[in-house]
Image (cartoon, rainbow, N blue to C red):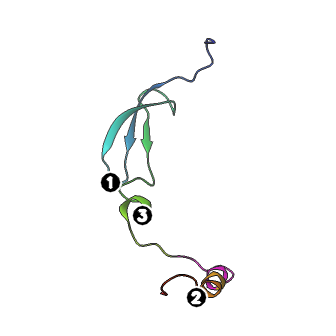
Amino acid sequence: MKADIHPNYHTITVVMTNGTEFTTRSTWGKEGDKMQLDIDPTSHPAWTGGSQQLLDRGGRVSRFNKKFENFGLGSK
């Protein structure tokens, strides 16, 4: 391996949105830095199964629904 081409791998603290912290190793920041998360698995709907809404911009969702309303077994 070539010398001095790899990033510095060190320990940081990650702070979740609810205030809990854990220590991990990363190339982000410097040794001992704290990474404050805006979105994490405890708050994001992709992980929590929260409700999601489709925004109909320009009627795209409406056109799609109309085009495929008779396709498949059931309807909404």
Q: Which residue is mark 2?
A: 70
**Which residue is depicted at the point 64% across and 81% down?**
64
* Residue furthest front as drawn: 73
Residue 60 covered by magenta stretch: yes
Q: SS for tag 2?
A: loop
Relative height, residue 10 to residue 3 (above, below): below
**Which residue is depicted at the point 65% across and 79% down?**
57
Q: Does label 3 or label 1 sit earlier along the sequence? A: 1
- Residues shaded magenta: 54-62
Q: Which residue is mark 3?
A: 45
Q: CA distance from mark 2 to mark 1?
A: 45 Å
**Side of 10 where 71 appears, left or right:** right
| Amino acid type indicated by mark 2 | Asn
Closer-to-camera residue (58/9): 58
- Label 3 close to label 2 by CB (< 8 Å): no
Q: SS for tag 1?
A: loop
Q: CA distance from mark 3 to mark 1?
A: 15 Å
Q: Does label 2 or label 1 sit earlier along the sequence? A: 1
Residue 45, image x, y percentages: 42, 64
Q: How many numbered tags mark residues here?
A: 3
Q: Tell me which corner region of the image, top left, top right, bottom left or bottom right, holds residue 60.
A: bottom right
